[in-house]
Image (cartoon, rainbow, N blue to C red):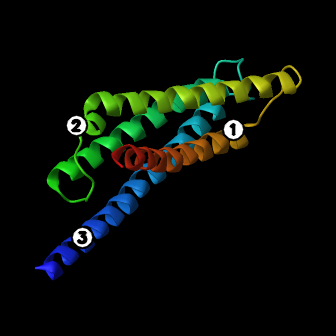
Amino acid sequence: MPDYVEHNEEIKVSNWRKFVRKNLLLHLIPNTVLNTVIPYFAFKAQNSVHLFSGEQNLARFLLPMSLLLPFMITLDILKKIKELQHSGAINFKVDDKISGYPFILKKAGLNGLYSIAIVFALMLTLHFSFPPDHDFGITPSAACAGLLAGLYSITFFYLAIRRFKIDAA
């Protein structure tokens, strides 16, 4: 009987590792590619890319992405963890307080608000640091948007898991 319990725990740890690997790649690759390609082609239709001014400015892509990506990644990961918990595929205790939708929405909302506040503050700092009408360039701007999306994918994926483990303990 103890061998069965030990084998069952190994399967649950293996399920957890598969979950982390699969979902990290599912978030990282599409977010990075799409958030590089879409701004690149949008910026290609104009001569220069400014931070806040112009028809297609960098803030128009970065600020919504900074709110929505952390929110959606956190929401998705915590919902998947909740499903794994209830199916018994991972060995975290099921607690309604930390696996209910109010908890999930609160964590996702806070992640989105914190990230947009930080990015907006950094963008304002850049705006006042550079001379007026500074051009950031099409390719570097699109690459920065893609790298930021990749950073969000990794950061908020692991942050959601870490927050869940801390609250589950």
Query: Which of the numbered marks, if any, corresponds to residue 96?
Result: 2
Q: Is disc 1 placed on a helix, strand or loop?
A: helix
Q: Amino acid at mark 3?
A: Glu
Question: In this orientation, which residue lies closer to the viewer: 47 or 8?
Answer: 8
Q: Which of the 4 quarters of the picture holds residue 12?
A: bottom left
Q: Residue at x 72, y 17 (%)?
A: 53
Q: Residue at x 55, y 43 (%)?
A: 149
In the image, is residue 137 above or below residue 168?
A: above
Disc 1 crowd rating (10 Å Cα; few below 14, some 14-19, many 20+) is many
Q: Residue furthest left?
A: 1
- Residue named by callout 1: 141
Q: Amino acid at mark 2?
A: Asp
* Label located before the other in sequence (1 or 3): 3
Q: Is residue 92 left or right of residue 86?
A: right
Disc 3 crowd rating (10 Å Cα; few below 14, some 14-19, many 20+) is some
Q: Residue at x 30, y 67 (%)?
A: 13
- Residue named by callout 3: 9
Can residue 45 be spotted in the picture?
no
Cα separation between marks 3 and 2:
23 Å
Q: Is disc 3 placed on a helix, strand or loop?
A: helix
Can residue 142 be spotted in the picture?
yes
Residue 18 location (% of width, % of height): 33, 65
Q: Which of the 4 quarters of the picture holds residue 78?
A: top left
- Quarter of the image where the N terminus is located: bottom left
Cα separation between marks 1 and 3:
47 Å
